[in-house]
Amino acid sequence: MAELEVEIVAADHFVWSGAATMVKARTSDGEIGILPGHSPVLAILAEGELAIQPVSGERLTVGVDGGFFSVDSNRVVIVADNARIGGSVTADTK
């Protein structure tokens, strides 16, 4: 089965990387789902949650508050202003 190589970084720290079968994100133009074989794309990331289905393990959610992501050759790179595994990043900023 084909896989995505996913890497998530925030402005000041590493968040997560690994193999996944699906990534779902909210962009400035709406929601997008990425599966292996997706055409290249570069998009502005909107505030919300990323959903990642790792090859092994349970579904992972990452709260982000902006940034961008790129997809090329089954590699997904997400660079967020702030990011937190498991929930909203707004709880960290209050």
Image (spheres, rainbow, N blue to C red):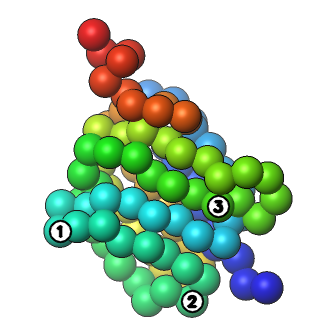
> Which of the numbered marks, if any, corresponds to residue 37?
2
39 w.r.t. 31: above or below: below
**Residue located at (51% from left, 55% from top):** 51
Q: CA distance from mark 2 to mark 3?
A: 16 Å
Q: Is residue 36 visible?
A: yes
Q: CA distance from mark 1 to mark 3?
A: 22 Å
66 w.r.t. 84: above or below: below
Locate the C terminus and report the quarter of the image it occupies: top left
**Residue located at (55% from left, 79% from top):** 35
22 w.r.t. 85: above or below: below
Q: CA distance from mark 1 to mark 2?
A: 21 Å
Q: Nearer the viewer, mark 2 or mark 3?
A: 3
- Viewer-proximal residue among 36 and 70: 36
35 w.r.t. 77: above or below: below
User: Disc 2 residue type?
Assistant: Gly
Asked if disc 1 and disc 3 are in contact, CB closer than 8 Å, the reply is: no
Q: Position of residue 25 (x, y in %)?
A: 39, 60
User: Disc 3 residue type?
Assistant: Gln
Query: Label 2 neighbourhood size at 10 Å, few (<14), some (14-19), many (20+)?
Result: some
> Which of the numbered marks, if any, corresponds to residue 53?
3
Q: SS for tag 1? A: loop
Q: Nearer the viewer, mark 1 or mark 2?
A: 1
Is 22 left, or right, of 20 in this rendering? Answer: left
Is 62 left, or right, of 25 in this rendering? Answer: right
- Nearest to N terminus: mark 2 or mark 3: 2
Is 80 left, or right, of 43 in this rendering? Answer: right
Is 24 left, or right, of 82 in this rendering? Answer: right
User: Disc 1 residue type?
Assistant: Asp
**Residue located at (64% from left, 61% from top):** 53
Q: SS for tag 3? A: strand
> Which residue corresponds to mark 1?
29
